[in-house]
């Protein structure tokens, strides 16, 4: 599959194919647009769902229509209210408000009535074959299927058996209800598809009321129709289901909802199957569904993504009719672009090296005024304390620097951001030869951008006053997988064989004191380091910050 590195410019894009379809029908006088987002509550939503949410809610909004949230809860075995709640939270967080909150399970009575109607029309029958037998007699693309010996039961017998299925007289798997279509149909899905199966299983909403549950293909289109959905948008793999979707609606003579398919979102270095994500959670490979390395919406939120950045991403990837894979860098580009405008700047040292400024008075503290956000004047300034001992990044010092290294090195000067010029006079090492601290001098006339004799110093580094610093834990994240497509596994391996052992690095950092006041979820740019968001694992003693994304923008560079 092609990897898309360059995406359409969101601001001047042409209509996507769904907008074209809608505008054509508007031109014909059909002006009502109603969509739905139909998750199955069997896991947390991920970035792929976010695309579908933005699309469904976005189209409704653009054309003055409605979008429902509908839980496709027809499989009681895998579903749970925990997931229902998280899905609602995530859709809200993305900035969307649903017109109605619906559940396929609310339609179980109506679906049952309609099944009876189809039986009466001679369009459905109870089959005593096992699901395995049914599968084996379906035939192949080139060979027609075999009709069930029970296919020509009388309407009366079918009605009786179906009612007894509902009444709980039969065990799981003993009988199914099938649509009577055509066992030789070229589309295998129309070879008498199963409409109902017996499942003696408690449902998270209907409890033990039902022991027969409708299949996706029967429940989905009928639910759309009940809600009078005009545009039922789903992913490409459902295109072969469309004739069946239409068949049920036609046979029942109910509101004609229509199904449209678009390409699902795939991202490099990412898996999106809920089943596999659940495996990561259950095997404790990640900290939970909201581990910042997960592609779930709650994980992106915890990592520091903004709703606007996710919406911008969905807009940029657009709506395709053919499958592709989007570069993960595009998602990072979107959050970087948003946070650059909105996140306040702070100084934090993630890989600390102590610096003693030997000619600075021991008991003195000065405050330097720092700009909170150069992109937003209204964000104002803050005061940052400076004293004799500070921390700088280890990377900002080199004992034997290469040419064009403008940061600190022996005998060289560097500018401390918003503060003085310092010069490295001495490198202090332990017995093993590791650098433990630097002794520097400062130029007292060099505060806030000036110097005593007008000399120019190229390098500027950030710093934190040691006496005032807040110790913190920072978590740096890399891709969870080392393989571009972790779903594409070699023989004998699983996607778990491609985990990145270095996907999370924990460091002890020092933060400027203003960060003590930050609350969980607050987002900052740690100058020269990256964007960070305060994590829920923070304690009063040790705040925890997640790196949302680094500052370096490999995606933008690559696409210049
Ligand atoms: P999984 O197969 O991992 O369980 P799913 O597609 O079955 O995922 P649903 O809860 O049924 O998950 O999906 C709800 C809606 O979100 C559907 O309309 C589905 O088409 C859409 N959706 C799911 N994954 C993606 C994706 N990667 N890109 C775009 N839309 C998606
Ligand atoms: Mg599904």
Image: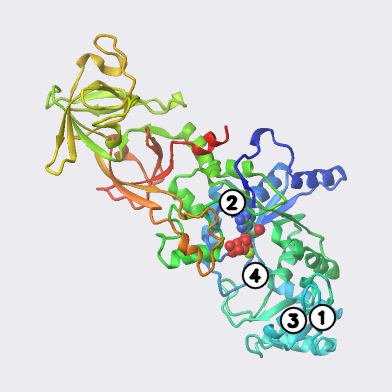
User: Viewer-proximal residue, 167 or 429?
Assistant: 429
Q: Where is residue 129 in the image (x, y as percent from the top left)?
A: 72, 88
Q: Name the residue under label 4.
A: 105
**Position of 180 relative to 408 (above/below):** below
Q: Name the residue under label 2.
A: 50
Answer with the quadrant where ligand 2 appears in the image: bottom right
User: Viewer-proximal residue, 519 or 390?
Assistant: 390
Label 2, label 4: how far apart the Cα atoms are: 24 Å
Label 1, label 2: how far apart the Cα atoms are: 39 Å
Q: Mark 1 points at which residue?
A: 119
Disc 4 C-beta below 8 A from ligand 1: no
Whichever of labels 3 and 1 marks the residue nearer the N terminus, that label is: 1
Q: Which tag is nearer the camera, tag 1 or tag 2?
A: 2
User: Viewer-proximal residue, 398 or 290?
Assistant: 398
Q: In this view, does 303 lie to the left or right of 421?
A: right
Q: In this view, does 536 lie to the left or right of 65?
A: left
Q: Which tag is nearer the camera, tag 2 or tag 4?
A: 2
Whichever of labels 4 and 1 marks the residue nearer the N terminus, that label is: 4
Q: Position of residue 450 (x, y in %)?
A: 29, 13
Helix, strand, or loop for circle 3?
Answer: strand
Q: Is residue 51 visible?
A: yes
Whichever of labels 2 and 3 marks the residue nearer the N terminus, that label is: 2
User: In the rendered view, how is the structure colored?
Assistant: rainbow
Q: Do the residues labelled 4 and 3 touch (CB within 8 Å)?
A: no
Q: Name the residue under label 3.
A: 177
Q: Is residue 137 left or right of residue 122?
A: left
């Amino acid at each position: 599959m092609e990897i898309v590195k360059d995406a359409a410019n969101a601001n001047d894009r042409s209509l996507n194919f769904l907008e074209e379809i809608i505008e054509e029908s508007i031109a014909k006088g059909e002006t009502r647009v109603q969509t739905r987002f139909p998750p199955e509550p069997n896991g947390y939503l991920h970035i792929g769902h976010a695309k579908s949410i933005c699309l469904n809610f976005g189209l409704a909004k653009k054309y003055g229509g409605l979008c429902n949230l509908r839980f496709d809860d027809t499989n009681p075995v895998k579903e749970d209210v925990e997931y229902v709640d998280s899905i609602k939270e995530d859709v809200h967080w993305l900035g969307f408000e649903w017109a109605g909150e619906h559940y396929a399970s609310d339609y179980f009575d109506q679906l049952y009535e309609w099944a009876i109607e189809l039986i009466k029309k001679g369009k459905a029958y109870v089959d005593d074959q096992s699901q395995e037998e049914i599968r084996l007699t379906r035939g192949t693309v080139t060979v027609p299927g075999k009709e069930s010996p029970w296919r020509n039961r009388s309407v009366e017998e079918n009605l009786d058996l179906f009612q007894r299925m509902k009444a709980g007289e039969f065990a799981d798997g003993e009988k199914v209800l099938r649509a009577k279509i055509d066992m030789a149909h070229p589309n295998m899905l129309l070879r008498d598809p199963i409409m109902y199966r017996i499942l003696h299983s408690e449902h998270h909403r209907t409890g033990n009321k039902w022991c027969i549950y409708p299949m996706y293909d029967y429940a989905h289109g009928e639910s759309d129709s009940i809600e009078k959905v005009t545009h039922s948008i789903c992913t490409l793999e459902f295109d072969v289901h469309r004739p069946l979707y239409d068949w049920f609606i036609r046979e029942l003579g109910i509101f004609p909802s229509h199904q449209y398919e678009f390409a699902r979102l795939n991202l490099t270095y990412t898996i999106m199957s809920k089943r596999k994500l659940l495996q990561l959670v259950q095997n404790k490979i990640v900290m939970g569904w909201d581990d910042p390395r997960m592609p779930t919406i709650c994980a992106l939120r915890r990592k520091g993504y903004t709703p606007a950045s996710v919406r911008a991403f969905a807009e940029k990837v657009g709506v395709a009719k053919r499958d592709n894979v989007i570069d993960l860098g595009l998602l990072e580009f979107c959050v970087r672009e948003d946070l650059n405008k909105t996140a306040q700047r702070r100084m934090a040292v993630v890989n600390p090296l102590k610096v003693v400024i030997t000619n600075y008075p021991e008991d003195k503290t000065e405050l330097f005024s720092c700009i909170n956000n150069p992109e937003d004047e209204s964000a104002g300034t803050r005061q940052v304390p400076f004293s004799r001992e500070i921390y700088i990044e280890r990377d900002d010092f080199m004992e034997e620097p290469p040419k064009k290294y403008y940061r600190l090195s022996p005998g060289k000067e560097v500018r401390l951001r918003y503060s003085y010029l310092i010069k490295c006079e001495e490198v202090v090492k332990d017995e093993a030869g590791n650098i433990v601290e630097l002794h520097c001098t400062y130029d007292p006339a060099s505060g806030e951008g000036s110097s005593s004799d007008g000399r120019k110093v190229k390098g500027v580094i950030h710093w934190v006053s040691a006496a005032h610093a807040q110790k913190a834990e920072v978590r740096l994240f890399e891709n969870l997988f080392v393989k571009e497509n972790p779903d594409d596994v070699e023989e004998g391996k699983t996607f778990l064989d491609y985990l990145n052992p270095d996907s999370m690095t924990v460091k002890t950092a020092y933060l400027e004191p203003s960060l003590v006041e930050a609350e969980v979820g607050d987002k900052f740019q740690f100058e020269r380091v990256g964007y960070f968001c305060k994590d829920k694992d923070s304690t009063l003693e040790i705040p925890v910050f997640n790196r949302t994304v680094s500052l370096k923008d490999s995606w933008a560079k690559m696409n210049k």
